[in-house]
Image (cartoon, rainbow, N blue to C red):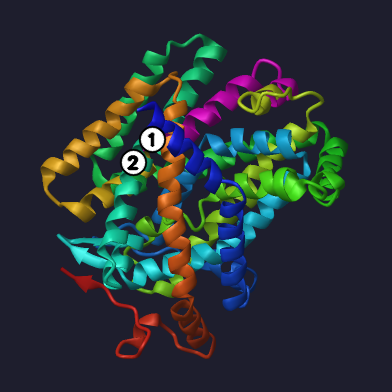
Amino acid sequence: MSVFFEAAEKLAGAFWGLPALVLFVGGGLYASVRLKFVQFRCLGRAFRETLKGSEKSAEGPTPIEALAASLGAVMGPGNIVGVSSAILLGGAGAVFWMWVSAWLGMALRFAESFLAVKYRVEKNGERRGGAMYIFRAKKMPAMAAAFAGAGIIVSLTMADAVPASALGNALAGAWNIPPAVTGAVMAAFTAAVVFGGAKRITGAAQITVPVLCVFYALLTGAAIVCRPAKAVSALAEIFSEAFSLRAGAGGLLGGALRHGLSKGVFSHEAGMGTDPLLAASTSENDAYRQALVSMTGPFLDTVVFCSFTAIAVLTAQNAGNDPASMARTAFSEFFPGFGGWASDVTLTLLVLATLSSWAFYGEVCVKYFSDRKLFVNLYRGLYCAVPLISAGADLSKLLVIGDLTTAIMAVPNVILCILLICEVKTAEERRLIGTSSVDKMRGKRYHNYTEKL
């Protein structure tokens, strides 16, 4: 078994270095150029479409509910610990490259979400989609099965066990709460949400995520008000260090550039194929509009939310050198007695949002193989039990498995987006010349359809 983990660690380590940066950054840049930088041209419209909302429908969650659930899935501990780690390893300039990663990722998110809606299917009254259904439509069943299988493993490891472990350790260290108690609370919350199905998951996310964002924004805003000059200095430091020698000689492999881009990819997950699983399930019939709404996710997650953490850490006089506690130390400095508690509440809400949203992703992957209630409920039960086992535990080996299976999802998904970008580009161009709905392209070479099984 140790030989297996050693091999898996070497493979994961080899991929999540320069190859991953080339894949995600290169894929994002290629998609941006082919789509004429849709993330800049249409960002205003994307937010208008998001704020406009959609009517409730029995066909699936609305686009705004799906966006909230998607943000809940990616806004995990990485938005606090990941940002702190990027700053610690790459300096303040790493935050700039996290922003660059998000802007490039927005084009990939637009493409993958569009394709997910275009190739989705309807089965047992549910809309389903994602890379596995696109692979199946393109007559590549082995790739489809590999993606779905990897999605199940990632949901149980990186998205379930790892956040539970992080929260269990954090609360035990700060408040002496036994990890078993933290795990039991997480398991109970997850069960209450997960066994309610997609509607309850997206409904919970639509409440939790906005409250979380507003709370954290107010907390960071108060910190900036306490030290406005220092906050301005922190912003200037982000831009100045992004192009300093720390990001130059050696930076391509180990400085601000590398750590900023890599932490950005893990933060927003654009190109990993996760968000399309939710995008395809929505009641939205217009693939173009759904792609616009989905595209706002990386912006909100990384450009907005991660910036809150970055400014707080950089504004503090001494945030320490432990990524797991830098944000907590910073807020404790700003607000003695309250800041640490507020940071722990934020981390708890982030973990709960991640647990509930990722359960949906895993369930979609399970249903790709079988719709039998037995298998679905077995998965739900296992997913809810994982926090009980993993809260406060050392999960280094699970991290290796999670890294490897995430790569199995990401590589084919980005390649798929690149190969099918012409379909997205054609739809985008037709919208620009006045086609009011992607649905009007039925019967033409590139059309939006929902296959019924």
Nearest to the observer: residue 112 or residue 190: 112
Measured in 3D between alpha carbons, the distance from the residue under mark 2 to the one under mark 1, in whole angstroms, is 6 Å
Image point 82% across, 25% down: which residue?
317
Quarter of the image containing the N terminus? Answer: top left
Residue identifier under label 2: 153
Sort mark 2 into few (<14), some (14-19) or many (20+) by Cα contacts within 10 Å: many
Q: Residue at x 44, y 25 (%)?
A: 395
Inspect the image, locate mark 1, and give the three-letter code of the amino acid beneath it.
Answer: Thr
- Residue 255: which quarter of the image? top right
Vertical placement of residue 266 versus 139, above or below: above
Quadrant position of residue 129: bottom left
Looking at the image, which residue sits at the far front? 3
Residue at 40% x, 30% y is: 3
Q: Is residue 51 visible?
A: no
- Left or right of 84? Residue 406 is left
Q: Quadrant of residue 33?
A: bottom right
- What secondary structure is found at the residue carrying circle 2? helix
Q: Is residue 61 left or right of residue 339?
A: left
Q: In the rendering, at what x and y percent does residue 337 appear?
A: 66, 15
Q: Are marks 2 and 1 in contact (CB under 8 Å)?
A: yes
Image: magenta residue range = 330-355
Q: Amino acid type of disc 2?
A: Ile
Give x and y (percent) for residue 313: 73, 32
Queried whether the magenta region covers residue 26, the answer comes back as no
Q: Secondary structure at mark 1?
A: helix
